[in-house]
Image (tube, helix red, strand yellow):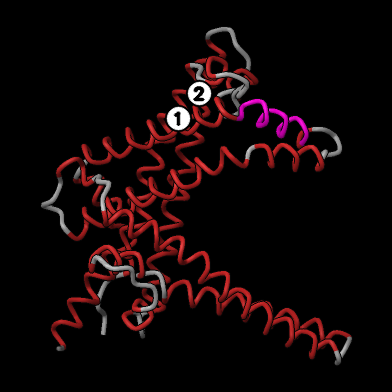
Amino acid sequence: MKLFSPTDAALEGFRLTRERPRVLLAWAIFQFVLSLATAAIMIRLGGQHLMAIESASSSGAADYETMMSEFKDLAPVYAIILPLGLVMMSIMTAAVYRAVLAPSDARLAFLRLGADELRLAALKVVFIFVWAGIAFVVVFLAGAAAALAGVLGGAASRFIGVGIGLFAVGIMLMVAVRLSLAPVITFAERRISVFESWKLTRGMFWPLLGAYVLAVAAIAVIGLLGMVIFSAVTSAIVVAGGGTLADAGAAFNPDATSLASYFTGRTIAYLAFAGVLTALYYAVITAPGAVAYRALMKARDEAA
């Protein structure tokens, strides 16, 4: 029984942003402002450490000791940036869910900061531990099986080792797909739900995987094409103004020693363009789960 079209689900984000260009613009502005704020925090509190890391990593022989020391000094900055990023990701995820599941609630371009977003942020933290546990079990069992296969030795051992590795990857992929609706369930039912997705997605692995693969492939192509066009246009403008291609490339690798050296016209233009791509990315990657949830819940209600 076909409950939803993987192709339609994969393209839902494109349909959503095409029909609501003002929403896409608002999301892009939100991402742009967030990028400016994040960069400002990083530069203000740790710009010299960032440049030291770049210098150590770009030297002929990477100075890992220096890099680790600088990363350690950046720990307080990341203590601010990471929670902020987690909440901002949840705001965008919830916005896409609202646009798909409650399209009439369009005030503030579906962007909010409330209990729904905080539950999604908490779920992401829970999933860190869940995935750590799952990965430990899978890797432990795969390692044990590989050790037993090693007793055989020779080509048979290598063949079995590859098979075990692929099997472990397949298990992780299967679990990821089966649990992929946990965020939308958490949003829609206003409670943190980790494993209910497993029951809801029974028999739906291949349609869900197809939708996710198509969505990732589509946004990857759009993103790559967009970056190529942006790079070409930027290079043409800079060269026409008497600059060099190296000057054009500075937009992708700005000087983080100070706010003035970082926020040049080219870098701001790049951040604005990246804001559009990021907003579109969230729409395309997040929408398939909402479409699947809506269809599966409808089928379950009709069968009840």
Q: Residues within 10 Å of mark 2 (few under 14, many from 20)?
A: many
Q: Nearer the viewer, residue 136 or 153?
A: 136
* Amino acid type indicated by mark 2: Thr
| Above or below 175: residue 69 | above
Residue tagged 2: 267
Which quadrant holds residue 255? top right
Q: Quadrant of the N terminus?
A: bottom left
| Above or below 153: residue 269 | above
Q: Residue at horizontal 47%, vertical 30%?
A: 230
Tell me, yes or no, whether the highlighted magenta stretch contains residue 54.
Answer: yes
Instruction: Farthest residue to the top: give it.
Output: 242
- Residue interval drawn in magenta: 46-56
Q: Quadrant of the C terminus?
A: bottom left
* Amino acid type indicated by mark 1: Leu
Q: Are marks 2 and 1 in contact (CB under 8 Å)?
A: yes
Residue tagged 1: 271
Q: Position of residue 288 (x, y in %)?
A: 32, 63
| Above or below 270: residue 222 | below
